[in-house]
Image: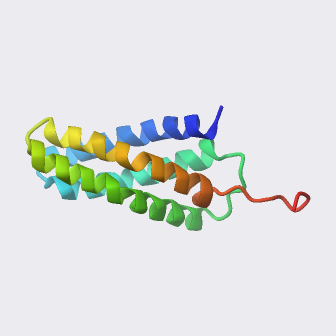
Amino acid sequence: MSHWIKFALVGSMGFGVDMTVFTSLHLAGLAPMEARGLAFLAAASTTWAGNRCFTFSDRSQGRAGGQWFRALTAALMSALPNFALFWLILRLVGEDWPGPQLALVAGIAAGTVSNYLLSSRWVFAATASPDKA
């Protein structure tokens, strides 16, 4: 199975975490952008773990803490288009259901490609083994 397909599967799991945490926090009274930030952190941590254990398990992993930091950095870089589109759509459709959820889906789609590229080429970069260097 290709890395891209595995990445998409893990991303689907992260999407579920993102949507669940976001919707729960928003229904509990948090403003959409505050709920979005906390949900993003939960989803980014979830997808890092899934990508480490499943998507890129064939690559040398290194220290988990440093890799999680790189994964969070990559996710934050990919969050720029994600949050920008989320905010724009929220302004266009409003904050009543299903507006925030539609904005969330569009934002996630905007950040997926850059997140994959950063993950595959930096966070979980393939390293040459000593006997192949």
Q: Quadrant of residue 106?
A: top left
| Residue 109 in view (yes/no) | yes
In the image, 1: left or right of 110?
A: right
Q: Is residue 86 left or right of residue 49?
A: left
Residue 56 percent coordinates (x, y)? 64, 47
How many marks can you see? 0
Name the foreground residue: 42 vs 123. Answer: 123
Residue 119, percent from left and from top: 55, 54
Give residue 66's position: percent from left, percent from top.
58, 68
The colour scheme of the drawn protein is: rainbow
Can residue 20 be seen in the rendering of this structure? no
Left/right placement of residue 44 relative to residue 125 reads left
Q: Quadrant of the N terminus?
A: top right
The residue furthest top is: 1
Identify which residue is drawn at 83% across, 58% down: 129
Residue 76 x/y as whole percent: 40, 62
Residue at the (89%, 57%) spot, across then down: 132
4 above or below 127?
A: above
